[in-house]
């Protein structure tokens, strides 16, 4: 293991020092764009004002014969637009693919100074992060990039889930993680054909008592993994995200899956369809009634200690901390969204 002193040293002479704290950014939805499609690239200027993160996808869902075009399309869209407060990310191809090296070698020198985060798929362990970390440092140094590019891992293999803490701890370049339920299902041998969400057969049956009709209660297939990811991320100061929800026709189920993730600690999810943008915005912006109650708690306990009763509910140092999480997020949302700022009264 590296010594604490060495941990924050740049990995190449001339590379920028890694961040000590993650930059403050609102990332409620990471919106996926297929950059080889010109019609989609043309929508990027409009998207920038609608979403928190624009991501150029180079990996799965991009046909093998369009990989090079997607990479070039991403470089073009990065050059053609000013992203201002909106994040610019790319999901590169996985480490063992024929495209990963050229993804990095072409994108970083061309648009590395505009790129906030590289999303790395199919991360199995800290060794994957170490490799990307070193390569990025070399490319940043060579290209004279002054702001470090962060790394976001997709948690989508059984091995990755097993090693989730070591992945979180692998580098100060780590931004966070997303659950990748489709690849993870395949990797685990789960018997599903869905991209995220529940399954009607994954249920607990009520007791068989006195011949009364039994009820099946559907359970959340992703609860264990999301909980494990949230603990690994938060203990290392990283951000956890729910990933994709593939059934665009079922907004209700998508909302419920996103909301479970939000309540458990996630800060955003992927939007793969324009329909999911507003939905993610609604779910990952705190509920105005919760914000109002949280503000009451903070105001009733100005120094965050002691115990008070509010609306019949006991509040103490711990609920003060919970309230602060909600109010801090609401302030961040309000700084970007004047409509919600008004609703929150912030
Ligand atoms: C995302 O990449 C997934 O596999 O679900
Ligand atoms: Mg995947």
Image: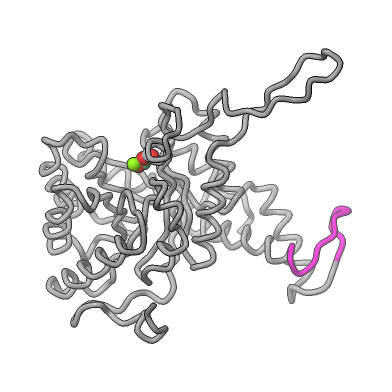
- Write the residue at 43% across / 58% down: 163
How is the structure coloured here?
one colour
Q: Is residue 1 above or below residue 33?
A: below
Instruction: Indicate yes or no whether the magenta region holds residue 311.
Output: yes
Query: As drawn, is 154 to the left or to the right of 82?
Result: right
Q: Position of residue 257 (x, y in %)?
A: 54, 37
Please tell me which residue lies in front, 264 or 342. 264
Q: Which range of residues does the magenta coloring cover?
A: 308-319
Query: x%, y% of residue 130?
Result: 29, 67
Q: Report whether 64 appears left or right of 206.
A: left
Q: Residue furthest bottom?
A: 5
Tell me where residue 70 sits by quadrant. top left
Give the quarter of the figure containing the C terminus.
Answer: bottom right
Depth order, front residue of 291/36? 36
Does 90 lie within the magenta span?
Answer: no
Residue at position x 43%, y 61% in the image:
25
What x and y, as percent, mark residue 120? 30, 54
Q: Does 112 appear above or below 172? A: above
Taking 44 as reference, is 175 left or right?
Answer: right
Q: Quadrant of residue 138?
A: bottom left
Q: Position of residue 42 (x, y in %)?
A: 20, 39
Closer to us: 334 or 94: 94
Quarter of the figure with residue 150: bottom left
Quadrant including the N terminus: bottom left
Of the four image quadrants, the one with ligand 1 is top left
Q: How many numbered marks have been drawn onto this rendered protein structure?
A: 0
């Amino acid at each position: 293991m590296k010594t604490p002193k060495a941990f924050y040293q740049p990995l190449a002479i001339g590379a920028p020092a890694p961040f000590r704290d993650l930059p403050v950014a609102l990332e409620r939805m990471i919106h996926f764009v297929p950059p080889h499609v010109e019609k989609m690239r043309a929508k990027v200027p409009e998207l920038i004002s609608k979403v928190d993160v624009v991501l150029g996808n180079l990996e799965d869902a991009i046909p093998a014969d369009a990989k090079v075009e997607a990479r070039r399309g991403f470089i073009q869209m990065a050059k053609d637009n000013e992203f201002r407060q909106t994040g610019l990310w790319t999901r590169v191809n996985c480490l063992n693919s024929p495209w990963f090296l050229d993804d990095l070698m072409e994108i970083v020198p061309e648009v590395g100074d505009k790129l906030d985060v590289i999303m790395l798929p199919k991360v199995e362990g800290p060794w994957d992060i170490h490799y990307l970390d070193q390569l990025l440092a070399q490319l940043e140094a060579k290209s004279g990039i002054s702001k470090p590019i962060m790394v976001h891992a997709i948690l989508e293999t059984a091995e990755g889930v097993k090693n989730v803490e070591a992945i979180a701890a692998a580098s100060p370049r780590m931004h966070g993680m997303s659950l990748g339920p489709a690849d993870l299902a395949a990797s685990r041998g789960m018997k599903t054909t869905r991209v995220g969400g529940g399954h009607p057969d994954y249920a607990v049956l009520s007791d068989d008592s006195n011949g009364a009709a039994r009820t099946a209660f559907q359970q959340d297939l992703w609860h264990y993994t999301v909980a494990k990811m949230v603990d690994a991320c938060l203990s290392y100061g990283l951000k956890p995200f729910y990933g994709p929800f593939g059934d665009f026709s079922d907004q209700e189920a998508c909302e419920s899956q996103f909301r479970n993730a939000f309540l458990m600690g996630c800060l955003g999810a992927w939007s793969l369809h324009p329909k999911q943008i507003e939905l993610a915005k609604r779910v990952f912006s705190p509920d105005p009634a919760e914000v109002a109650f949280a503000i009451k708690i903070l105001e009733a306990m100005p120094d965050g200690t002691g115990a008070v009763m509010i609306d019949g509910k006991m509040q103490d140092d711990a609920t003060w901390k919970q309230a602060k999480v909600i109010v801090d997020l609401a302030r961040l949302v309000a700084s970007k969204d004047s409509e919600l700022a008004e609703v929150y009264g912030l």
